[in-house]
Amino acid sequence: MPDRDALDRHLDSVLIGGREPFTPVISDYDPAWPSRFVDLEARIRSALGAAALAIEHIGSTSVPQLAAKPIIDVLVVVTDVEDETTFVPPMVDAGFMLRVREARHRMFRTPGRDVHIHVYSRGDQAIADYLDLRDWLRIDESDRTRYADVKRELAQRSWSDMNHYADAKSAVIQAVLGRARAWRTSSAS
C-alpha cells in the first residue's frame, strides 16, 4: 500500500507525539456545538489578539443537522504560519497543545482532544476550501447526508491514527468540495 506508507512517513514527520490509535465516534448533531465554538473563539481571541486575522467554526460540528465526531474544529488565520513566535506561545499559554507542524499548517488541540485548531497563513487555499465546504454542507441536504453516511460507515473500523480516518474520507470530501466551489463561483457572479 504505497499511499498508506507515504501517509505514514508524512505523519511521522509532522505529528508531535507520534501516531495515536483512533476509533471514531459519530454523534448526531448537537445544538450545543456552536456555543462551544463561541467560547473557544473568545479564548483564542484573548490569547492571540490582533494576530488572529480570522477565527471560524469549521468541520462537521459547524454544520447544523450533520452527524459528527464531537470535536470542535476551528480555523485561525494569521499573517504567516511560519512565524510561530506570534501565535504558538500564546496558544500554549491558553492551554492548547501543538499537535501538528507541517508546511503551511499548524494544528493545536486541547488536552481532552475535543478541540482541533487549524492555523493557516492569510490567503492559503485551505481557508477557502474549509469555508466553501462548510457553507455548501449547510445548504445542501443531499451532500450532507452522503457525507454523514460515509463517516458512519468508516466509524465501524478502528484506525491506527485519526489521519488515516480523515484520508479515507478524502474522496467524498473532494467530490463535495468540487460542488461547493462551483456553487461559490456561481453565487459570486
Image (cartoon, rainbow, N blue to C red):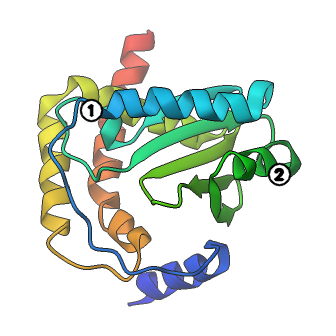
- Looking at the image, residue 149 sits to the left or right of residue 162; the answer is left
Task: State the residue at coordinates (37%, 63%).
Answer: 166
- Looking at the image, residue 148 sits to the left or right of residue 103; the answer is left
Nearer to us of marks 2 and 1 is 2
Q: Which is more toward the observer, 177 or 69?
A: 69
Helix, strand or loop at mark 2: helix
Task: State the residue at coordinates (45%, 12%).
Answer: 188
List the residue tagged with mark 1.
137
> Mark number for residue 97?
none
List the residue tagged with mark 2.
84
| Mark 2 burial class by Cα count in 10 Å: few <14, some 14-19, many 20+ | few
Relative to residue 71, is residue 145 depicted above or below? above
* Quarter of the figure with the C terminus: top left
Relative to residue 157, is residue 127 depicted above or below? above
Residue 77, image quadrant: top right
Task: State the residue at coordinates (19%, 67%).
Answer: 155
Where residue 13 appears, as percent x and y from the top left, is: 66, 79
The answer to whether the residue labelled 2 contacts the one labelled 1, judged by CB atoms less than 8 Å apart, is: no
Amino acid type assigned to the residue bearing label 1 in the image: Leu
Residue 108, image quadrant: bottom right
Where residue 177 appears, as percent x and y from the top left, is: 36, 41
Where residue 33 appears, as percent x and y from the top left, is: 32, 34
Q: Which is more toward the observer, 189 or 165?
A: 165
